[in-house]
Image: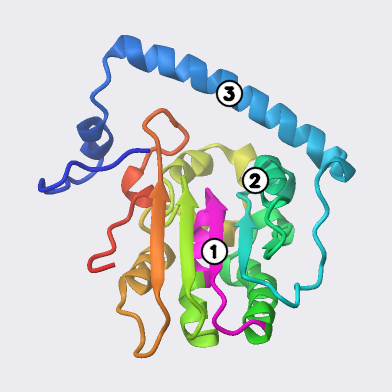
Amino acid sequence: MAAAPSGIERPNLPSFRDWIDTRTPWNKVVDFTISLFKQTIYSTTTFYYRYHPNALPEFSQTWKEESEGLVVLVHGLRNDPACWYAQLQLLRNEPAIDVFAPRVLHRGLCPLAEAEEPLLAQIKDYAEKHPGKPICLLGTSNGGRLVAQLEISLREEAPSTPVKVSSVAGVILGSSRIALIETILPLRYFYPEPLRNELRYRSERATKLLEELQAPLPEGCAERSYEFYATTEDLLIPDLDSTLPELPGK
């Protein structure tokens, strides 16, 4: 996990990555090789579980009567709930916890509001049936953007529900990779224009999302906590301030 040195003003990109990445060139090569190997294992395992869903533990589609909390697992673009195979295996050992690991609408290839709507409906249903029970929202990449939006919506939709947000390599402020995608014509067809508009680095939608996330909680709103994770080894996430947003006072 990358974290900015405390007590030092954060510089603007593109220097931010270099500012916190103090590894030698040799260490960068070694770390990248190890990361590539781990990513290959992860992708292969996810592919297996995607086409062998019966190998994953089953979770009831109805909430437990004596539920102690809800864990929501939101995957990234073009991914699948199977990517949570390791977490699902662990959560199987928590009988008092409900688990919601949905397949995001269009696998995330749609505007934020469209992707959020069916997820929010399910989470609201849990909050209404289990008032005051905590909800943990965990998302990766574009899923990190989704869980941030869900938390904002729950401030009004379920104000008495404590919420914890964990975002892994989330693109809260979008990604400069979108600019590259838009220069390569064939790639445009894999990312609909409304989604590209939202995911541009520091787009209007991305800036609004961060502002809403930073806004003070409404009076009487239950506790919120946030965790943002990133690594300098991940070259697919060039904008670390997008992944590690600042939430003053939270």
Q: Which mark is residue 136?
A: 1
Residue marked by disc 2: 87
* Frontmost residue, 134 versus 179: 134
Q: Earlier in the sequence, mark 2 or mark 1?
A: 2
First to last magenta residue range:
130-150
| Quadrant position of the C terminus in the picture | bottom left
Name the spot of residue 153 as percent of width and height, x first: 51, 78
Label 2 sits on what residue type? Gln
Marks 2/1: CA distance? 13 Å
| Left or right of 101 on screen, residue 26 | left
Task: Give the quarter of the image for residue 97.
Answer: bottom right
Q: Secondary structure at mark 2?
A: helix
Residue marked by disc 3: 38
Name the spot of residue 169 as percent of width and height, x first: 46, 45
Q: Is any atom of residue 198 visible in this view?
A: no
Marks 3/1: CA distance? 26 Å
Residue at point 49% right, 15% down? Answer: 33
Residue at point 47% right, 61% down? Answer: 165
* Frontmost residue, 160 versus 183: 160
